[in-house]
């Protein structure tokens, strides 16, 4: 999924940004957001969580999930 997420980030850089966090290396942040498994995608708008989804997701569905949450 990592190459697909990088591709999505590149193709949508004028619409949204994509960041990556390693759960094991960032335990405090993982606890703060209730991350217990990977991959999980948390969508933020103006610093607030507006959505989340988990697991392997087809590229078009991933983009639609993000756009739905931020619009």
Image (cartoon, rainbow, N blue to C red):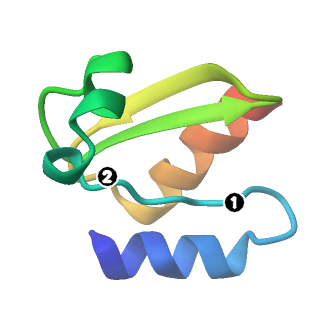
2 w.r.t. 64: above or below: below
Q: Is 33 positioned to the left or the right of 65 in the image?
A: left
Query: Can you tell which quarter of the image residue 9 is in?
Result: bottom right
Numbered badge on residue 57: 2
3 w.r.t. 35: above or below: below
Query: Can you tell which quarter of the image residue 71 is in?
Result: top right
Residue at image x 29%, y 29%? 28
Q: Is 25 positioned to the left or the right of 10 in the image?
A: left
Residue at image x 87%, y 68%? 14
Residue at image x 44%, y 64%? 59
Q: CB atoms at circles 1 and 2 under 8 Å apart?
A: no
- Quadrant location of the N terminus in the rendered image: bottom left
The one of 20 and 70 positioned closer to us in this rendering: 20
Residue at image x 47%, y 49%? 61
Q: Is 25 positioned to the left or the right of 4 in the image?
A: left
59 w.r.t. 2: above or below: above
Badge 2 crowding class, 10 Å Cα cut-off, few under 14, some 14 to 19, many 20 or more, is some
Compare marks 1 and 2 and give the one earlier in the sequence.
1
Look at discs 1 and 2 and give the one toward the viewer: 1
**Tally of marks:** 2
Badge 1 crowding class, 10 Å Cα cut-off, few under 14, some 14 to 19, many 20 or more, is few
SS assignment at label 1: loop
Image location of residue 53, percent across then percent down? 38, 31
Image location of residue 41, percent across then percent down? 40, 41
Quote the CA–CA distance across marks 1 and 2.
18 Å
Q: Which residue is mark 1?
A: 17
4 w.r.t. 60: above or below: below
SS assignment at label 2: loop
Image location of residue 18, percent across then percent down? 58, 60
Query: Can you tell which quarter of the image residue 49 is in?
Result: top right
């Amino acid at each position: 999924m990592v190459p697909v997420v990088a591709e999505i980030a590149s193709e949508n850089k004028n619409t949204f940004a994509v960041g990556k966090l390693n759960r094991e290396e960032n335990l405090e942040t993982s606890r703060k957001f209730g991350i217990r498994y990977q991959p999980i995608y948390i969508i933020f708008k103006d610093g607030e969580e507006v959505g989340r989804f988990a697991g392997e997701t087809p590229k078009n569905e991933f983009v639609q999930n993000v756009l739905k949450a931020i619009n």
